[in-house]
Image (tube, grey):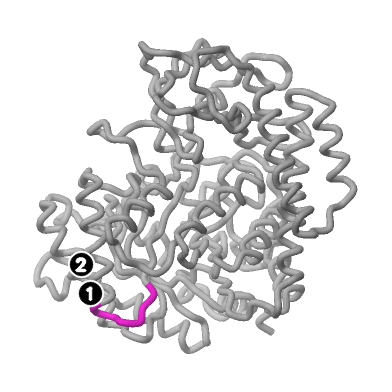
Amino acid sequence: MNRREFLAATAGAIVPAHLLAQVEALGPEEVASPTTRGSGPILRVAAREADGGIMELERYRTCHARDLANDPLPQAIHSDHRVAQIALPKEPIQISYRLKVPDFGEVYCYADNNGRGYSAPQQIDFISEAATTRLRRVREILALAQQEGAPLADEINRHLEAAAHTTGYASLAQSLHAGEKISLARARHRISRLAAPRKDFLFGCMISPFESQGAAFEQRVRELFNFATVCWYTWKNEQPPEARIDYGRMDRSIDWCLQRHIMPKSFGYVYLTKGATPEWLRNWSYEQLLAEYPRIVAQTMRRYGDRLPYAEIMNEAHDKANLWKLSHAQIIELAKRSFAAAREASPKVKRQMNHCCLWAEYAKNTNADGSRRWSPWRFIKDCLASGVDYDVIGLQLYYPQQDLLEIERMLDRFAVFNKPLHITEIATASEPGADPHSMRPTTTAPGWHGPWSESTQADWLESTYTLCYSKPQFQAIGWWDLADIGGHFWPHGGLLHGDLSPKEGYHRLAQLQKSWGVARA
């Protein structure tokens, strides 16, 4: 069962694709900051396109304030499309804008006032400030690379020299390239110094089409993957309680994995979205939910016992999946009870909390009650401080319109929690344009180093996998979906075509595994 089928089946009805996209959308680019004109101190931020023209509307809407830890702040922005007037909070802020940088690509860039943030009313030129900020950040990781003894190509120095002797977009392009190359050089150096290949590293994929695609799909999975996300269960009728769940496809998918010596990961499952919730449950009170979800989690964990090494117990609860508009205190209590129920029912299962949208662009706005929205990082921090006990942090990394250095900076933030980290879902496109067969049929992501192609997808895969494999706290990566067979989540995001023939990214992953000494065959 793929994600589209799950959301439709669990709700008891077929949901139109455009509504599914709203339910599941990562949503960053559709969410603009509040537009109410602030009455207090204002930071004025001027920005322009690389040709000197007025910022295009799509990119203009991406301007927002972030705290210095790199989480969004719901600051009001009023603009004439030339200068954004941002209400200053009581803490220093950095500014982020998604820029189309010639000779690099379209990514978010940051201005942080030399790491101090902006706290006083003034006007800044964003492009100039962003170039300065990026060059400083690159020099900081360059110093780390030199301390670590990482081999650095001569072209890195050429990029840095050019960045230092140019301005604006030209400087940004050079330092964006330099930062990515240094991040990868450090990662490859860490891998070269491993005492032994990471034979226990989990290379995963979603196996939902295992029944419909037969032997060809099985072959592709078995060639590269030792870990798999299996099919969800589906909801049935409200009564009787013990028969509310149909486990048929979950049973078969777990058996399929175990018979092929592939480690399965399944679901608990607290996922508070409309598409994942049957109609009869949607009108329940919080008190009823607080009893029902832990009951289902416990029932599911007891069913599988030692046959299920990993289970995702809660998904996207950080002010993304919140059908009942529960308060933060209510979400935390539900999490605490659900994870406790999983542990009591299965003493050995490794319980996972899963998170999407790591940069939390959706948090440019407040919750309906006026509270600041959780980012994934702040949500984890609050859960752990409140005694929510679980074993594995799951992070989704669909192409986030960030360069590799900023991806690494974000991933490294989560190491502070001292828990194993899994990239539970990851994908990017293999060709430009919309994909009418995907769950996001109108979504198109800006290109990275040029328009998306099979080669660009493979390059991005190689880079992100290299970063994660080089870090011991990251223990798994799961590509989602494996094939573009219809109903897949990310547009053109599979490593296989619809006929299951491999794309370049599939072959690149095989080459990586061989070079690291962890190939399956």
Name the spot of residue 116 as percent of width and height, x first: 56, 30
Residue placed under numbered mark 2 in the picture: 294
Q: Is residue 139 above or below residue 469?
A: above
Residue at numbered disc 1: 298
In this rendering, is residue 66 above or below 144?
above
Tell me if residue 104 comes above or below residue 51 in the rendering: below
Residue 450 x %, y %: 73, 40
Residue type beneath disc 2: Pro
User: Does 349 appear in magenta?
Assistant: yes
Give the side of residue 56 with respect to residue 33, left or right: right
Q: Residues within 10 Å of mark 2 (few under 14, many from 20)?
A: many
| Residue type, numbered disc 1 | Ala
The circle drawn on residue 411 is none
Observer-nearest residue: 57 or 196?
A: 196
Label 1 sits on a secondary structure element that is helix
- Indicate the quadrant where residue 135 lies: top right
Q: Is residue 44 magenta?
A: no
What residue range appears in magenta? 344-350
